[in-house]
Image (cartoon, rainbow, N blue to C red):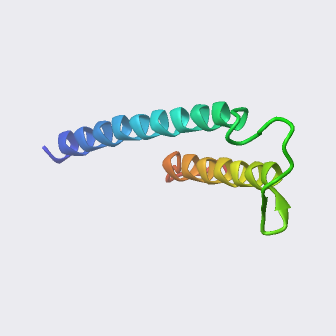
Amino acid sequence: MEDYQYQDFKNYMKTKRNKLLAVIDVLAILLFAATFSPYVMPSGKVEPYIMGVSYTMFMGFLVSVLFVVLAFLVSLVNKEKEHAD
């Protein structure tokens, strides 16, 4: 009986993990699309400055940080009990 419950819980967690990965994938695709939008990269504009850095460079840095956070979330979701090493 307990083995069945364990397998049921394991399957539940696997589907939950797959859904979380799908959400993170969609967020990454939306962030990628937003990277080239006029909100992040306005054409022909240097101003405004945010903390002494041009807007485009600041937003590029922010997008990079968001991609790192998404990659970290993927590593947390895909964490396995047994490692290769």
Q: Relative to 47, does residue 14 appear above or below in the rendering?
A: above
Count of numbered circles on the image: 0
Residue 82: give x, y in percent of width and height: 54, 51
Horizontal relation, residue 27 to residue 12: left or right: right
Q: Residue at x 25, y 45 (%)?
A: 6
Residue 52: give x, y in percent of width and height: 84, 67
Which of the two residues, 6 or 50, is positioned nearer the viewer here?
50
Horizontal relation, residue 57 to residue 13: left or right: right
Which of the two residues, 72 or 31, is positioned nearer the viewer here?
31
Residue 37: give x, y in percent of width and height: 69, 33
Q: Residue at x 67, y 47 (%)?
A: 67
Q: Quadrant of residue 16?
A: top left
Horizontal relation, residue 80 to residue 9: left or right: right
Which of the two residues, 69 or 78, is positioned nearer the viewer here?
69
Residue 45: give x, y in percent of width and height: 84, 43
Judged from this view, the residue extending furthest toward the bottom is 51
In the picture, the quarter occupied by the N terminus is top left
